Image (cartoon, rainbow, N blue to C red):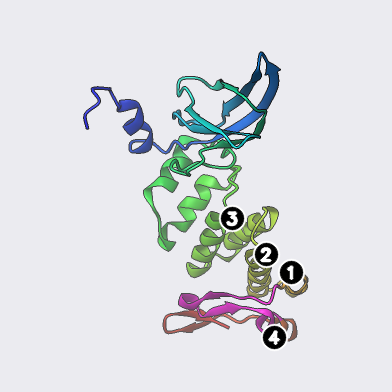
Amino acid sequence: MESGQNLAWFFDQWVRSNAYACYQIESTESRPEGDGFRTEIRIKRLGPMKMPVPVKAVFEDGSEQSVLTDRTRDVDILEFQSQAKLREAILNPDNKIAMMDKPVAEIPPAAARVLSWGWEAADSLEVLDAIRDETIESVDLWYKLGTYLYEESHLREALVCFERVSDLNADPVVAFASQGWMGLLEDLTGRRAEALTHYRKALSLDTGKSMAHGDLGIRIDRKWVETRLRSPFRWKKRRGGMAS
């Protein structure tokens, strides 16, 4: 149905930019007023995208009210009148808007441009050069870039990526595998003592699960790490990838 409204603000953000939505409930207050309660819910925009975001107020008597924030405001205070005190405030209750839980650190336009294009192993050095000094907290990005750099034989650069993974709050299996990767890379660059340190750290993080990279001929699990403690990783060419 045609609304007659100019929706350029919507398409410019979602389609023509790399902006993202990130809003948070900053505070809530529910106090008696008259025969009921007056509730204020303070919503703050933390990301660059400006969107009307639904907010649901659930009250102690089971009643609910929902409103949209004003997209033009960086901080919006929503007011509700009810018979009961606020029990819970829910942002984006139906998850219809793709939102980040926390804001992403800003990066220069050149780095954002490289990441938004889509890239493959052959582009890995260019991508690393663009983001090496940036505060990017994407575990998936650094892990993927590390494997791509390894595939292109850029071993020291790959190690940089897995070190970044280890500094972030990674999933336990990813944290385990990243230590295995660091050991592998240290082995290949002749730093056996450092490799052993990473293998031992990997064992301490073992969850019983594995991380497989079939295209590279590598499967990092407890047995693989224990083997690496006894013998260094060796780089051998094989059909479909590299393996020890």
Q: Quadrant location of the C terminus?
A: bottom right
State how far apart marks 3 and 2 are (Cα). 12 Å
Q: Secondary structure at mark 4?
A: helix
Decide if residue 117 is on the left or right side of residue 221.
Answer: left
Badge 3 or badge 2: first in the primary sequence:
3
Q: CA distance from mark 3 to mark 1?
A: 17 Å
Query: What residue is rendered at 42% in x and 84% in y?
Result: 239
Q: Earlier in the sequence, mark 3 or mark 4?
A: 3
* Residue plotted at (53% across, 42% down): 100
Residue position marked by numbered label 1 in the rendering: 205
Q: Which residue is mark 3?
A: 139
**Distance from Cα at disc 3 to Cα at disc 4:** 26 Å
Alpha carbons under labels 1 and 2: distance apart: 7 Å
Crowdedness near tag 2: few (<14), some (14–19) or many (≥20) residues, C-alpha within 10 Å: few
How far apart are labels 2 and 4 at the CA level?
Answer: 21 Å
Q: Which residues are magenta?
A: 207-225
**Mark nearer the N terminus (1 vs 4):** 1
**Which amino acid, by three-letter code, is at mark 1?**
Leu
Q: Please report contact status of discs 3 and 4: CB closer than 8 Å, yes or no.
A: no
Percent x, y of residue 1: 22, 32
Pick the front one: 168 or 107: 168
Left/right of residue 92 with respect to residue 2 in the rendered view:
right
Q: Nearer the viewer, mark 3 or mark 4?
A: 3
Q: Which mark is residue 172?
A: 2
Q: What residue did someone put label 4 on?
A: 227
| Relative height, residue 11 to residue 78 (above, below) | below
Amino acid identity at mark 2: Pro
Q: Classify 227 as above or below 78.
A: below
**Are discs 1 and 2 less than 8 Å apart at CB?**
yes
